[in-house]
Amino acid sequence: MRIRHATIAAALASLLLAAAPAAARDVSCRLTFTMSGWSVLYRTASGTGTIRCDNGQSMAVRISAKGGGLTVGKSEIRDGRGEFSGVRDIREVLGTYATAEAHAGAVKSSKAQVMTKGEVSLALAGTGRGWDLGVAFGAFTIEPR
């Protein structure tokens, strides 16, 4: 009887060890968003979006960007896209990312930016309209809606 319990315990332990790497794998998450804002030395923008991950998780979010620098303008981004890396759970994407950017655009413009928050990185891309010019540093924040 003891040998049988030991065999069952060994089988369960090997199943748990085999499942651990699958649970620890990175999850692919994407952000779709719209936002608008302005800048005159101080830069601010806000909007909404949705994050969807390949493990079935999704979340409606509120996004904001704040910072300062030598910057001036007014812009709007529609159909923006973002891709996260270094994520194991959708909750890890929430929080504030450090940003630095140089930007210039008139009427219709495109924008791409990469930012980090610890081990999580976010690459943003989008097209919009407005005008802007400058160099800015700041924060990009993602919160649940």
Image: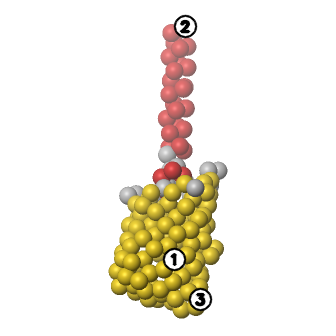
* Residue at figure coordinates x 54%, y 92% from the top left: 106
Q: Residue at x 45, y 67 (%)?
A: 140
How far across and how far down the image is residue 104, in percent?
A: 47, 89
Q: Earlier in the sequence, mark 3 or mark 1?
A: 1
Q: Would residue 41 be visible to someone looking at this image?
A: yes
Reply above or below: 121 against 5: below
Identified by mark 2, the residue type is: Met
- The location of residue 13, given as percent across then percent down, is 50, 28
Position of 123 relative to 85 (above/below): below
Q: Look at label 1 and name its amino acid.
A: Gly
Residue at point 56% right, 72% down? 35
Q: Earlier in the sequence, mark 3 or mark 2?
A: 2
Judge depth for marks 3 and 2 and give the one in front: 3
Residue at image mark 1: 37
Mark 2: give few (<14), some (14-19) or many (20+) Cα within 10 Å.
Answer: few
Mark 3 is on which residue type?
Lys
Quadrant assignment for the C terminus: bottom right
State the residue position of label 3.
108
